[in-house]
Image (tube, rainbow, N blue to C red):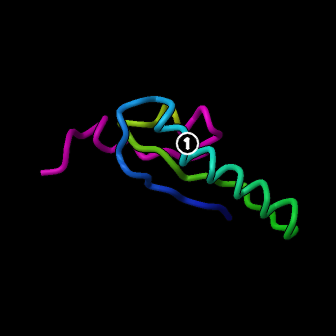
Amino acid sequence: RGLMAIPAPASDFDRQRQPFARLRELRDRLNADDGLALDTLSMGMSDDLEAAIAEGATLVRVGAALFGPRA
């Protein structure tokens, strides 16, 4: 159905966007060149969800924002 990414942490918005943009571009290439129908981009967590959404995320993981950091 799709692709997933958990990039290395980055504090700068533009640096957060880079790996998400690369994954979106890969998804687009796979759909166009290989005839796939990947419709899901699972990328972004509580600390970088804005950057992930800006790059087309269709699924974000926000557990820490809701429940706090892991113990």
Q: Is residue 69 magenta?
A: yes
- Rendered view: 59 above or below 51: below
**Which residue is pictured at 52% across the width and 34% down the height?**
51
Seen from the viewer's position, the closer of residues 56 and 64 is 56
Which residue has dot 1 on it?
18
Seen from the viewer's position, the closer of residues 71 and 32 is 32
Extreme-bottom residue of the structure: 34
Q: Quadrant of residue 17?
A: top right
Q: Is residue 66 magenta?
A: yes
The magenta segment is 52-71
Q: Secondary structure at mark 1?
A: helix
Q: Amino acid at mark 1?
A: Gln
- Rendered view: 50 above or below 7: above
**Which residue is pictured at 68% across the width and 64% down the height?**
1
- Rendered view: 63 above or below 39: above
Picture coordinates of residue 4, whole percent (x, y): 54, 59
Picture coordinates of residue 34, whole percent (x, y): 85, 70
